[in-house]
Image (cartoon, rainbow, N blue to C red):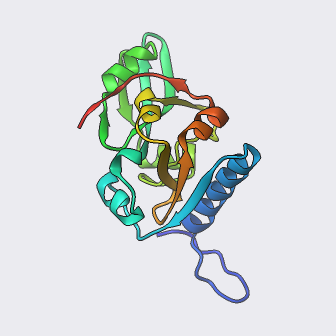
Amino acid sequence: MGERVCFPASCTLQREDIVSSVIFNQLIALLDGGQARYRVIEHASAGRSEEAAKARGTQIEQGAKALVCHVKGNGIKQHVLAVLPAHRKANLLMLAQKLGGTRASLASPQEVMALTQCVFGAIPPFSFHPDLKLVVDPLLFQQLDEMVFNAGSLERSLLLNVEDYQRIVKPEQIEFSESA
């Protein structure tokens, strides 16, 4: 599936492994630079929020789910990284309207990779792409003291202090989630 990169001792790393390491290293550099309180969790591969919480040994309410969306209409054409608590679902119409658009949809796997360098489920709640606007549902900051999210990989997560995330990222807050 992925392009293989060979090194003298082995030929086991795939393109996805290298890209996820780049994203992970960007996250660590940003968090260390901001003196964030966090911990790395290695775990079995998990995609769905419930499976990820179980694999990490955390509560689902701690999860930060990041979705890449298109918002369109009223002259708006914007890619958005919409972050919400993992136990809730996104109301894409509400998201679009709050951003001035009339409709929103999830991005394709190819667009997700181009904008985040991650596969679905591995997207951290950080935007490193200038064309990807970051918005966060404020409920994320009202759940618990720590949030957890995949860090560019389905097998590696970060447990991060919520106040540190908010201080470092300074995300735009928009209510767009609803009960699952």
Position of residue 93 in the picture relative to residue 151 (left or right): left
Position of residue 103 in the picture relative to residue 136 (left or right): left
Observer able to see residue 165: yes
Q: In terms of image quadrants, where is residue 132?
A: top right
- Rendered view: 103 above or below 40: above
Looking at this view, is 126 or 143 the one in front? 143
Residue at left offset 43%, top offset 32%: 142
Observer able to see residue 130: no
Residue sitting farthest toward the front: 145
Position of residue 29 in the picture relative to residue 155 (left or right): right
Q: In terms of image quadrants, where is residue 17?
A: bottom right
Position of residue 117 in the picture relative to residue 56 (left or right): right
- Rendered view: 153 above or below 165: below
- Rendered view: 75 above or below 152: above
Residue at left offset 31%, top offset 22%: 93
Residue 174: x %, y % from top left: 45, 22
Q: In terms of image quadrants, where is residue 65?
A: top left
Residue 70: x %, y % from top left: 43, 30
- Rendered view: 36 above or below 156: above
Residue 77: x %, y % from top left: 49, 21
